[in-house]
Amino acid sequence: MIYSCAVLFLFKNTAMIKWILRILGILLVTLLLLSIIAPTEHNITKSIVINSPARLIHNEINDLSRWSNWSPWDKMDPKMVKTMGAKYVGEGASYTWKGPKAGEGSMLITQSNADSIRSTLKFGWGEPASCQFVFSNEGAGTKVTWNMQFKTPFPWNAFSMIMGFDKSIGKDFESGLAALKTIGEQKAVDAAKYGGYSIQEKDLPEVVYAYKREVVSMQSIAKYFGQSYPILGKSIGMAGAKVSGPASGLYFMWDAKKKITDMAAALPIDKSIILNGSGLGTISLKGKALVLDHYGAYELTANAHYALDTYKKEKMLASKEPVVEQYITDPMVEKDTAKWLTRLIYFLK
C-alpha cells in the first residue's frame, strides 16, 4: 500500500521534481562558473591620516588588550569572549576569541617595530590571514595603512564573491581606522599636557595578586625584586595556582625624604589562594583607575608618576594605595630599554 502511494505521488509530481532538479542544476552550474571567475586571493587595504604622533597610535595596536577600544569586530559581537595570551604586548603577543557572530579564531603579532606591526589571524576555516599596519609621516600627522591578505580556496571562493568579503571587510577597516583616529587625536591632546604621556580613565576588572611585602630602601628595590620573585613563584605553585600576567610592583607608601618604600613584589594569579610565610599574602584589585604606559628605562618612571599626579590635581581626583606598576616587557628578552613598557595604575577612591 505504501509502495503504491509513493509511486502514485511520484507519477503525479514528476513535473515538480523535474523543475526542482532543473533549479538545483542551474544553481550548481552558476556556483561552478562563479568559482572559476572569482578570485582566490584577497588583498584589502585602507588608510587614514591621524593628527597624532605615530608612537601613540602604535601603542593602541601593539597592545592587544586595547583593541576593544577601537576594533570593529569587538563592537560587532559584544558577546565575544577574548582570552589574552601570556604576552599581550609586542612581538609574540596573542589572544583567542569566540563569539556567536565572530566565530572562533586567534591572533598572533609576528613582528613589531616603529614603522609597522605584522600579525597572523587564524579563523575556524581556511588558511591563516596575514595582517599588517604601516605607519608613515603625513604632514604633521601619521598615515596609518591597514592591510589584510588571505585566500579562499576553490570552490568556496564563489561564496566569498557572493557575500562580498572584500567590500564588507573594507568597511570594517574604515570603521576601525575612524575609531583609531578619534582615540589617537585625543591622546595627542592629552600627551601635550602631561609631559608627553597619554592617561586613560578605565574601569579595570578584578585581578588577584600574590605578593611578598616589606619596607625597603629605594636603592634596594631592584635587589628586593630579584630575591622575592623566585620565592613568590615557588609559593604560588605550591598553593596550586598559576601566574596569569606580568611581574608587578605594589607600592603602599613612598617616603622621598627618608628614601624608603613600603612595597611588594607581586605576580597576578588565576585564582585566590592562601600563602603562608614572612611578608607573603594576596590582594584583589579592581575598579576605576588611571592608567599610563611608560616606555623607557625603569629609572625614568618618576616622570610618569609626576604626570599622573598632575592629572589628578587638574581633574580633582584622589587615588588610593597601592600604586601598581606592571613590568610588561621582559628585560631578559628585550635589551633595548627604549622598548621597555611599564604600565602604571592608580586606583581611584
Image (cartoon, rainbow, N blue to C red):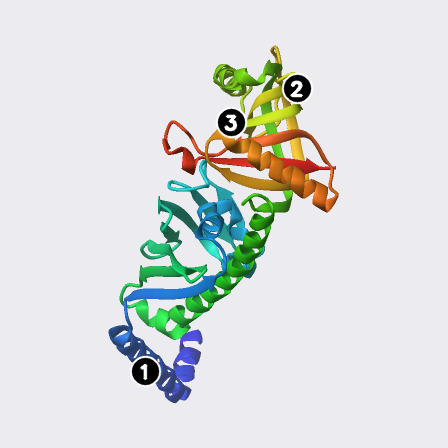
Q: Secondary structure at mark 1?
A: helix
Residue under numbered circle 3? 242
Q: Secondary structure at mark 3?
A: loop
Cα distance in 3D space between marks 3 and 1: 58 Å
Circle nearer the N terminus (3, 2)? 3
- The amino acid type found where label 1 is placed reads Ile
> Residue 168 at what x, y percent from top left?
44, 69
> Residue 298 at what x, y percent from top left?
49, 29
**Above or below, comparing residue 74 to residue 9 in the picture:** above
> Residue 197 at what x, y percent from top left?
55, 44
Choose between 159 and 297: the one closer to the eye.
Answer: 297
Residue under numbered circle 1? 26
In the shown orientation, is residue 81 left or right of residue 121? right
The number of discs equals 3
Residue furthest out toward the left: 36
Check the picture and name the quadrant holding the N terminus. Answer: bottom left
Circle nearer the N terminus (3, 1)? 1
In this view of the protein, can residue 284 be seen by the observer?
yes
In this view of the protein, can residue 80 be seen by the observer?
no
Cα distance in 3D space between marks 2 and 1: 85 Å
**Above or below, comparing residue 258 to residue 77 in the picture:** above
- The amino acid type found where label 2 is placed reads Lys
- The amino acid type found where label 3 is placed reads Lys
Mark 1 crowd level (few <14, some 14–19, many ≥20, 10 Å Cα): few
Circle nearer the N terminus (2, 1)? 1
